[in-house]
Image (cartoon, helix red, strand yellow):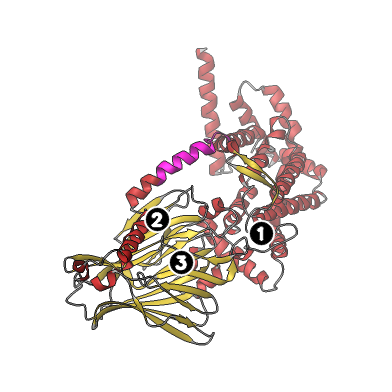
Amino acid sequence: MDKNTFTGLFLIMAIIAGSIYFLKPSEADLKKEREVQHQDSLKKAGAAVAAAAAKTTAKFDTAKTAKVDSALLKMPFGAASVGKEEFVTIGNKELLIKLSTHGGKVASVELKNYKTFDKKPLVLFSGNNNQFGLKFAAGVANINTNNYYFTPSAKELNIAEKDSGSVTMRLSYSPTQYIDYIYSLKGDGFKLGLTIKPTGLDGVIANSSTINLNWATSLRKQEKDIKMERQYSTVYYYNTDGDADYLSEGKDDQKSISDKKMAWVAFKQHFFSNVLIAKGGITKTDIAVATDFNDTTDVKQMKADLSLTRGTDGSLPLEFYFGPNRFNTLKDQGHDLDKLVNLGWGPLKYINRFAVLPVFNFLNKFNWNYGLIILVLTVLLKLVLSPLTYKSYLSMAKMRVLKPEMDEIKAKVGEDNPTLLQQEYLKLYKKAGVNPLGGCLPLLIQMPIVIAFFRFFPSLFELRGESFLWMHDLSTYDSVIKFAPIAFLGGVNHISLMCLLMTISTLIYTYFNNQISGATGQMKYIGYITPLVFLFTLNSYPAGLNYYYFLANMFTFLQQYLIKFMVDDKKIHAQIQENKKKPEDTKKKKSGFGAKMEEMMRQQQQIQANKNKKS
């Protein structure tokens, strides 16, 4: 690739990147637009979870203080329509769960062995924004079990590591007619079993093979940067054909699915998930996600309306997973829960899944500090890619040696006829046996790996809370300097030292790369723009990611420094001159790329000649 072509491509990329970053609307405008979109999404998706919960709470608070309506008591499940909310605590080695008698639902979940970024107990969700209820018709009444009071079989249940136990929450219609929520828990693990079993209600509940379930909650902030946490949080779903997908991570979204049977639905945060596994399958799925940007304590509001398949006895066998988004932990749960870890799209996913992750897991067995693991991972990657680095360097050296002859052609032909100039360059490349794309192709081959790491490190649970050098948490940014938010820079309020070091290393690498390639003029300076754009783009990304890019830059520079002693410009020049002396094999078939290039050049030259005649 000659200088003009490469410069043009680089300028276009830089302009696009700069335009996207510096011409975006102010934070105030974005906030206003988000509010409008959020309110619209809430209306369309029916996801006004907080408002609905507040109304429900007010209704039952009034019921407790006002005189009980005798007509209400005569309605189906009328006796359970009033009561006092109490909590049943069940726990094992990993989980501390509170069940509420109001709705018989899981009211809150605490992960015992994890803490929030500020070292507080890590509670996935709690409060009135959490809803979980069966919806069905009973006589003339529409019932939502979330609004009724259940009777627990026990007040508390603590399970030893090797044991298991269960608690039943009962919603009574009569002494012999009721709905049981049977919660079961083992002494170890992140799963909570739930079997919903109606008894004696065949004449009360409409006879159907499915029953509707409403599940909704607001996920609480766990990490330092709520903006980044929101970026990786949304509703995931997985069908019985083995395909996983998710709603938008960047905006309010909703979806209705009836052509595929779902196996599970997950309310996924950046590093933790709440998954509902339906063992009988989900025939219809309506899901929604919304963000209240004025709320600094909740990440997102998520909702799922599900049509669940009932068993032959009318029961619903369900299972919850409340735990970390660690790939190996999720994989051990079965049901392909490991697909909750987003490792990228297309080929990036396979690079991370079958190459990077196995190497990382192998290194993790040595119990090294994660900073050291990233270092070794970078060294191994650079060794694997070293042949490509060598070919790229050699190709740039050939172009550097050939540059004086290219300058002579340019002086002879002039810059007024770029098509003819390109043709002459191609003739020179062909005689000299030099591929102008030889320096670009090895870099392009490496690009998918570089981009794959961009998704790998932000999704890597193992980095959460792990420190290295001055970086207290490799899963988030390392802010060494803080200041008031700058609106025109997207609300940036800090400078990440590792991101700054990464930028400096990229600038140093660009400088020495210019020396290798012999770049002059605009080409000499254009390469410095992209690192400066990345300084602002990656400033809030995980320190572990910027640390990897820093190491990759330094090792690439080291490789090129060592390769420099293996490549002799005089020998390259002599070889080029020998190639030029060889007779051209006119019978040799041109490559498809070469033939197309020459044909394109001829067409361009003809067009230019016609323009000159007209003028």
Q: What's the CA distance linking mark 2 and mark 3?
A: 19 Å
Residue most toward the top? 615
Q: What's the CA distance linking mark 1 and mark 2?
A: 34 Å
Mark 1 in CB contact with mark 3 (< 8 angstroms) = no
Q: Please identify the quarter of the rendering in which residue 373 is found.
A: bottom right
Identify which amino acid the numbered label 3 is placed on.
Asn
Residue bounds of the magenta highlight: 22-38
Left or right, 604 with respect to 579, comes to left
Mark 2 in CB contact with mark 3 (< 8 angstroms) = no
Q: Is 499 situated above or below 90?
A: above
Q: Please identify the quarter of the rendering in which residue 77 is found.
A: bottom left
Which residue is more in the foreground, 239 or 126? Answer: 126
Which residue is more in the foreground, 271 or 598? Answer: 271
User: Does any portion of residue 435 appear in the rendered image?
Assistant: no
Q: Earlier in the sequence, mark 2 or mark 3?
A: 2
Q: Residues within 10 Å of mark 2 (few under 14, many from 20)?
A: some
Residue 23 included in the magenta stretch of the image: yes
Q: Which residue is mark 3?
A: 274
Q: Position of residue 460 (x, y in %)?
A: 59, 62
Q: Which residue is mark 1?
A: 474
Identify which amino acid the numbered label 2 is placed on.
Ala
Badge 3 element: strand
Name which residue lies at 47% across and 61% down. Answer: 268
Name which residue lies at 78% across and 40% down. Answer: 573
Badge 2 element: helix
Q: Earlier in the sequence, mark 1 or mark 3?
A: 3
Q: Please identify the quarter of the rendering in which residue 169 is found.
A: bottom left
Q: Residues within 10 Å of mark 3 (few under 14, many from 20)?
A: many
Q: What's the CA distance linking mark 1 and mark 3?
A: 24 Å
